[in-house]
Amino acid sequence: RIRAQNPAPQLYFVKVDVTGAYDALPQDRLVEVIANVIRPQESTYCVRHYAVVQRTARGHVRKAFKRHVSTFADLQPYMRQFVERLQETSSLRDAVVIEQPRPLPLPSLPVVR
């Protein structure tokens, strides 16, 4: 909030023409930056949260909450593929695997009054 002040603060207005602003940029670097924005697979990681429920040798139920991180290129999009990969790479046997979806954080938007 701005309160009435004597004298009123000075305001400056600037008008700029940016039609030729991108001509001075190195085109190869500009293409590289845009390509990284459009397809960031190499630097994008996916985190999958899941729970594993197993029965111990004594008959007790054991729960473990785990996370698996993979690159976007190595992502197993379906849970069945993911569990098959877990069975191949670890000693996951006689277990129930439960995916725990996490909401994605949304960017905050400015509040306009």
Image: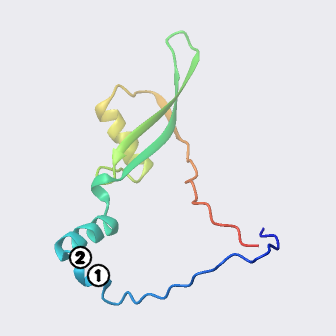
| Image point (45%, 27%), residue name | 94
Categorize mark 1 by other alpha carbons within 10 Å: few (<14), some (14-19), many (20+). Answer: few
The residue positioned farthest toward the right in the image shown: 4
**In what element is the residue under mark 2?**
loop
Residue at (27, 54) in percent of width and height: 42
Residue 46 place in picture, x, y as percent: 41, 48
| Residue 107, x across and y down, in percent | 57, 60
Quadrant showing the C terminus: bottom right
Between residue 84 and residue 40, name the one nearer to us: 40
Q: Quadrant of the N terminus?
A: bottom right
Answer yes or no: do the residues labelled 1 and 2 have beta carbons within 8 Å?
yes
User: Which amino acid is tagged 2?
Assistant: Leu
Q: Amino acid at mark 1?
A: Tyr
Which residue does the numbered mark 1 point to in the structure image?
22
Q: Which residue is mark 2?
A: 25
Q: Quadrant of residue 83?
A: top left
Residue 92 numbered tag: none
Q: Is residue 100 above or below residue 38?
A: above
Examine the image and state in which quarter residue 62 appears: top right
In this rendering, the count of numbered labels is 2
